[in-house]
Image (spheres, rainbow, N blue to C red):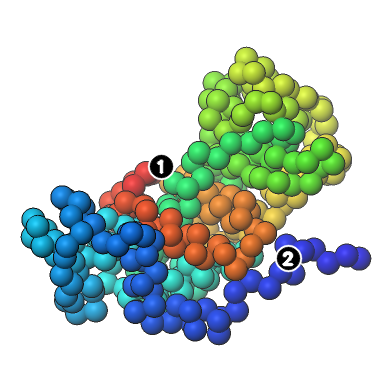
Amino acid sequence: MAMNRVQYQAGLPMLEFFEDYGTQEQCEELVRAWRWPQGFACPRCGQTWHSEFRRGQRLYFQCSACRYQCSLVSGTVFESSKLALPKWFLAMHLMTQAKNGVSALELMRHLGVSYPTAWLLKHKLMEVMHLREQGRQLTGRVEIDDAYLGGEIQGGKAGRGSPNKVEFVAAVQTTESGESVLLCLSKRPFTKESIKEFAAKSLAAPATLVSDGLGCFTAVRGTGILHEPHVTGGGAASSKHPSFLAVNTVLGNLKTALAGTYHAFGFDKYAHRYLAQVQYLFNRRYDLRAILVRLARAACQTNPCPLLAIRAAESSC
């Protein structure tokens, strides 16, 4: 049996990570280069003449023209954090190299921080992933399916009406032979209006949406997207239908990863971030060595995410 080139790629070994990102100075140089490729420019007046100083471990800049002061991480997702940059980079490394993700509890133990700190750090980084994937569009052949996160509460309503179940749509762009290319996961109800909105945002013509015939998916016909329904019925046979192998494989892996790593989280409130993390990693799965740099650079370009914004449902920092 041939080895899967995605699963067996080398990735970034931990020893090599510490050689490249193990010190505050190494991480500072990278953040500086990503924020100001042409050298520091004052965020207020744009002048480049400046002086540098430190308060504790944090590097600050002072503009020589307007006297404005800012830190190296001001205006980024790292702002207002007391954690040293190497701990942020280690968290990003762990979150991007683990196939099934890393829980906040695991981050707490690896980083030597409190659970609230690990939880907030993780959600800030997942929000970076969420924002980076917001503009993702699929084209060509696209398999789509409806799915749920969460389960029924004992004594509560059963089936689709369970208040602990969160609806989401999974769409996978494939090659004509059915191999997965890109993934889009979207927390939304299974209504025609919602699917029409999803098509306008996440699908780009020419595209053919391959569905199981659920009524809401017919809404894409008015958006310029072709619809190819395959009514499969229910049960195990429907999950093995050849027209949906890509999306069913993704959903199976997603649910296994979330159940095994996180066990439980606020499904209704935070599902969009956990789905965004899965989508972000899937769409960059072919180069595990580069994914840390891509996430760290994105974090440098993302506005600060305070705790109140992180705790708000469907937040966008």
Left or right of 13 on screen, residue 124: left
In the depicted view, which residue is nearer to us: 248 or 72? 72
**Regarding mark 1 in the picture, which secondary structure is present there?**
loop
Q: Is residue 53 visible?
A: yes
Q: Where 22 sits versus 245, above or below? A: below
- Amino acid marked by disc 2: Gln
Label 1 or label 2, whichever lies nearer to me, is 2
Q: Which residue in the protein does label 2 denote?
A: 7
Residue type at mark 1 is Glu
266 and 68: which one is in front?
Answer: 68
Secondary structure under the numbered disc 2 in the rendered image:
loop
Q: Residue at x 53, y 49 (%)?
A: 276
Which residue is denoted by mark 1 in the rendering?
314
Q: Residue at x 36, y 52 (%)?
A: 302
Residue 109 appears in view: no
Crowding around mark 2 (Cα neighbors within 10 Å: few <14, some 14 to 19, many 20+) is few
Mark closest to the chain's N terminus, 1 or 2: 2
Q: Is residue 107 left or right of residue 214?
A: left
Q: Which mark is residue 6?
A: none
Q: Position of residue 215 (x, y in %)?
A: 68, 22
Give the distance between the C-alpha atoms of the residues marked 1 and 2, in whole angstroms: 32 Å
Q: What is the quadrant of residue 195 in the picture?
A: top right
